[in-house]
Image: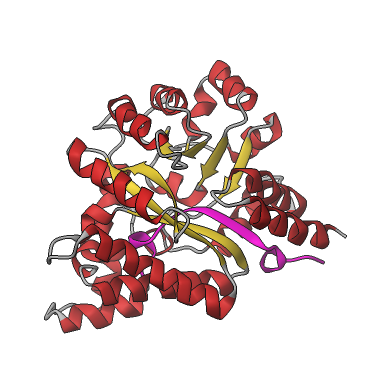
Amino acid sequence: MMMVNDIPKILLHLHLDGAIDIDDVFKWVKEDGIKISKKDLLRELQVDEECHNLNDYLKKFDLPCKLLQTCERLEITSYHLFQKLAKLNVVYAEVRFAPLKHLEKGLTLDDVVISVINGFNKANVESGIMGGIILSLMRGEEYEKNKKVVDVAKKYLGKGVVGIDLAGAEALYPTKDYVQLFSYAKTFEIPFTIHAGEAAGVESIKAALDTGAKRIGHGVKVIDDEALMERVIKENILLEVCVTSNYQTEAIKRRHPIEKLYRKGVKISINTDNDTVSGININREYARILQETKMDIEDLIKCNTNSIPFIFADDKTKNKLLNMHEKIKK
């Protein structure tokens, strides 16, 4: 009988600073002279019952961003995360982060991006895990600063960077305000995904689709609009769904619609969003879906295979992943 760990998993929505290794954090707070117990440290890093929205959830990124201000720490965090994923039988992962959050102690955007790429490359050599880095533009940030991130993405595209994203406080900074940035990115043919339909409603998803996005981070509010759902299906859009995170941010306050969306024909990628912040990993996320829905192992495998055409990689990598999944079906 096939188990969750047997599935060669594809992970497309995971934040680097939201999945920082707790032992690394404990070491670094000591180095920085921050006196805190490991128990209190967990409270700083992980959400609890007092989290009621995305803005509450995002506060858990404060400490990781404060610590990740050196090339060494950025590389170690990236390396440890990809190595952990490989042990969970993740065969392909796209990990995202916002380079603008790591410039407080004098690093340049190039320093930051190269460090994270180096961590991935080291894990790739040691474990064989495939994937790359997505650079997140930030809602609420100045246009010119976000534009510089697009320029860095262009510089390292195909050299570790695979695409860009838009992240941050979705309800406070509407998706429609960032259309110009993605128009700029499209001139360089940089692949992109956009957080939408998590903290904000269907208008955010529509705005993301209007930019030409073929992948939507979360997108679960599409369940509230039948016509929009039909558009997502017709235009062959992938939703990067993160069940546990959606409950924690209260993006979903009732039964999660992942199964309904999947049965309707919406393409679904199963993700964790932030392993450390949410206190989960991809295997536990899969197990939760199996427990709380009528989806089975074959459905989870299909979610993986359905996501392969949408990954920000070349056809050779896509074919390799398809072959892996074909073998486990036999």
Residue for point 57% across, 48% down: 311
Q: Is 1 left or right of 268, judged from the image as shown?
A: right
Whether the magenta-drawn stretch holds residue 4 is answered as yes
Q: Which of 271 and 254 lies nearest the eye of the viewer?
A: 271
The residue drawn where x is 29% and y is 32% is 171
Front-lying residue, 182 or 59: 182
Magenta stretch encompasses residue 330: no
Q: In this view, does 198 lie to the left or right of 29?
A: right
Q: Where is residue 275 in the image (x, y as percent from the top left)?
A: 43, 62
Q: Nearer the viewer, residue 106 or 202?
A: 106
The part of the chain drawn in magenta is: 1-20
Query: Which quadrant of the view contains residue 73?
Result: bottom left
Q: How many marks?
A: 0
Relative to 211, residue 290 above or below:
below
Can see residue 52?
no
| Quadrant assignment, res 165 | top left
Q: Where 2 sits versus 313, above or below?
A: below
x and y, in percent, of residue 274 in the image: 41, 57
Q: Quick check: can you spot residue 195?
A: yes
Q: Where is residue 226 in the image (x, y as percent from the top left)?
A: 57, 18
Quadrant location of the N terminus in the rendered image: bottom right
* Colour setting: secondary structure
Q: Nearer the viewer, residue 134 or 26?
A: 134
Rendered residue at 51%/64% (across/down): 281
Asked where in the image residue 325 lies, by quadrant, the reply is: bottom right
- For the C terminus, which image quadrant? bottom right
Where residue 38 appears, as percent x and y from the top left, is: 27, 78
